[in-house]
Amino acid sequence: MATKTIIIIGNGMVGNKFCEKLLEKSADFRLIIFSDEPYRAYDRVHLSDYINKKPLEELYMSSEDWYSSKNITLHLNDPIVHLDITKQYVESGRGIQLSYDYLIFATGSSAFVPNIPGIEKEGVFVYRTIEDLDLIKAYVNTTQKGTVIGGGLLGLEAAKALMDLGISKTNVVEFAPRLMPRQIDHAASTVLQQKLQQLGLEALLNKATAFIEGDTKIQSLHFTDGSVLETDILVISAGIRPRDELALKSGILVGPRGGIIVNKHMQTSEPNIFAIGECALFEEMIYGLVAPGYEMAEVAATTICEGNKSFKGFDMSTKLKLIGVDVASFGDPFIEEPYARTIVFEDKNKGVYKRLNLSPDGKYLLGGMLIGEANSYNMLLQTVNNHLVLPENPEDLVFGERSSSGQNASTGIAALPDDALICSCEGITKAQICHAVTEQNCENADAVKKCNKAGSGCGGCVPMVKDLVTMTLKQQGKYIRNVICEHFQLSRQELYDLIKIHELKTYDEILDSLGKGDGCETCKPLVSSLLASTWNEMILQKGNDTAQDSNDRFLANIQKGGTYSVVPRIPGGEIHPDKLIVIGQVAQKYGLYTKITGGQRIDMFGAHLNDLPFIWAELIEAGFESGHAYGKALRTVKSCVGSTWCRFGLHDSVSFAIQIEERYRGIRAPHKFKSAVSGCIRECAEAQSKDFGIIATEKGWNLYVCGNGGSKPQHALLLASDIDSETCIRYLDRFLMFYIRTADPLTRTATWLNKMDGGIDYLRNVVVNDSLGMAQQWEAEMEKLVLAYTCEWKAAIENPHIRKRFSHFVNAPDERDTSVRFDEMRGQKKAADWNIPSITS
């Protein structure tokens, strides 16, 4: 039997997936691909990462030699210009003529460009391909104001791209009365709009563009309501148009509004010609997501291999993070009474909106939407798709992700049927994931991904894949080890214990003794943190200096514009006037922007790398030391004035705050931690929002632990009440050592407690009642760390090996980086806004 030829027109994600699916079923075909782009198939879902300097090589779906290894012929930058459906041959732009047995249209879509007068002016772009992004990046160097037409998914993605390129003044123009009109309702749009506004993105709704003004370049948009918006660059993201022009010209049936008409087997009006992805019109629907495109590829490949599989439509539920804001919709998000009961939760303060649509009898979930918090999306989607019966109190689905117990999620996953579709991009079910664990020894999500590609598409299902792996391993009675990375088959706690037992002092010693390979960006900073937490030696000692987090390497936070911040320690916020004068003199001498922080310290921004040792030297001479603002360590111990000055103060909160800060300064931990001491229950120091907080009572101090601010604020919980200062410090020694020894990397104390079986009651038993019998050992270990403290700034400027790293140019150590730029702001200078130069391919 002769090998049959399949020609694929288009080499996007869906065309590439068709090749994969077909080759999984049969090798009896000759595959030839024609693409009008100069690049092989790349990940359009994460196209915005390219704006953030992600190399194009990392976006490619397959390596260059993959095509040749699979005997696939790939013609790039060579579109098909003629198709003869009678004689079954194609002709490319370069004159290549080939016959086919089967033809696959995977031409995708192009950006819809509205017919606005002036649309042809310089500075107007679309947002669709790598070439589009290259053009935008090359143009933004001359721009300050940016605008996007289109407030849908792609429009907001394009707006984020402009902001990432340094255009801080960006507007989105949307014709509809709300953002993302196909996914969310008006109330959700209002919350999303407020969140985006806080991030610097303005949304102009109900706006129709009349014309674009400018001589040769765009200068402004004029709207039909008479208003005008000045802009230097315009990106059009107002929808898509199926690429069906070749099919139409060849006599293949297309829809009245575009799209190549296909049946349930993805066949066009010509049975040996198929259409998949965004160019295909199935039952009057164009599917603009990658997951249905992948399903179409599977159906077409199965049909060609004489299998029996049908496309039955596809769930268009989606979850994504738009400019840092979670947005999700699932099932039927808009269904209203009397066809549904609706539960709505709205928190305008935090920018959270959740809507759940229940069946009229309240038994089933029909759909909904989530703005601001979408951790429960995967389980809610599964509840809809698998017609799961709701709990007695359906409102628990809205508040469930605020619970730390995790019981609802586990129970829900266990209740899913085996055929529940977990990874819609690759069509992987719960049963297939569990089978990978039980039969193919996959013990983590990465192993499952390599086994059956679950989670390799958009990545939205990865949390649920992880939960299924954990659940399946537990059902097998296996101990679940949270190993660090491929170079260390140990958990963080195991590695911590082994470092102490073997008295290992450098990264290389640890890698040689306990690991393998050369290490990576995951294990290097983690090991450095463990070394600092174990021995409290100079963080940049020889042998460890290349393994640090970037900020630790320079003992300063790297800021915008290639500058650094300097933050001296000011324990308890108490500072002598002479020291204030020194800070002012240093800031003035080195041209630093100064700001008082919320933690009662003074930040100095805009320092050149070469100047850091000189700035530190002057501050150290005046009695200052490093404030460790750059480290995963104690930041500040905030205080009110307490009984020293305040008529309500019960105890000397300032003195106790200074004592606490000087005890725990410099001690490295899994994450940064903060503290505060309040002199009475009026709580002026906000102690209950800290990793540990101390509040004066008439009988002593109340100790609170595991609170924090940040993106998900959480109050600290009472650990012990009415204790004296010595007891408070002992409990803190035990608490911090327990946290350092057992918390996962980059885990704040609040999250650590939330995941702890038994919660605050268990923690109290361990710390206060010494239920593990570890109190004496932890107190002794903390004492060693305290005694080993040294100011890292002082050590750095006194050590020639370390000091020489603070030069921007190795061959000219005294030369400054001339690319650093500043702007004036309120009488001080600030780093100039970034304009990222074009990266040509």
Image: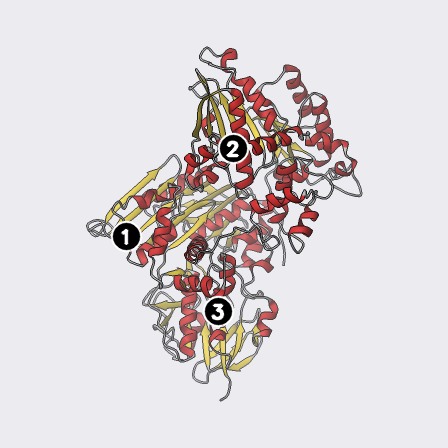
Residue at image x 34%, y 46%?
177
Where 657 sits versus 115, above or below?
above
Dot 3 and dot 1 residues touching (CB under 8 Å): no
Q: In which quarter of the image is the C terminus?
A: bottom right
Horizontal side of 608 relative to 653 (left or right) equals right
Residue at image x 80%, y 43%?
811
Residue at image x 32%, y 66%?
284
The answer to which of 284 and 251 lies nearer the viewer is 284
**Mark linked to residue 735:** 2
**Mark linked to residue 15:** 3
Label 2 SS: helix
Where 2 sits versus 742, above or below?
below
Which of pointers 2 and 1 lies earlier in the amino acid sequence?
1
**Mark linked to residue 365:** 1
**Residue 407 location (% of width, % of height):** 36, 47
Horizontal side of 217 relative to 802 (left or right) equals left
Q: How far apart are marks 2 and 3 (CA)?
A: 55 Å
Residue at image x 31%, y 59%?
386
**Residue 46 location (% of width, % of height):** 51, 55
User: Which-is-in-front pick, marks 2 and 3?
Assistant: 2
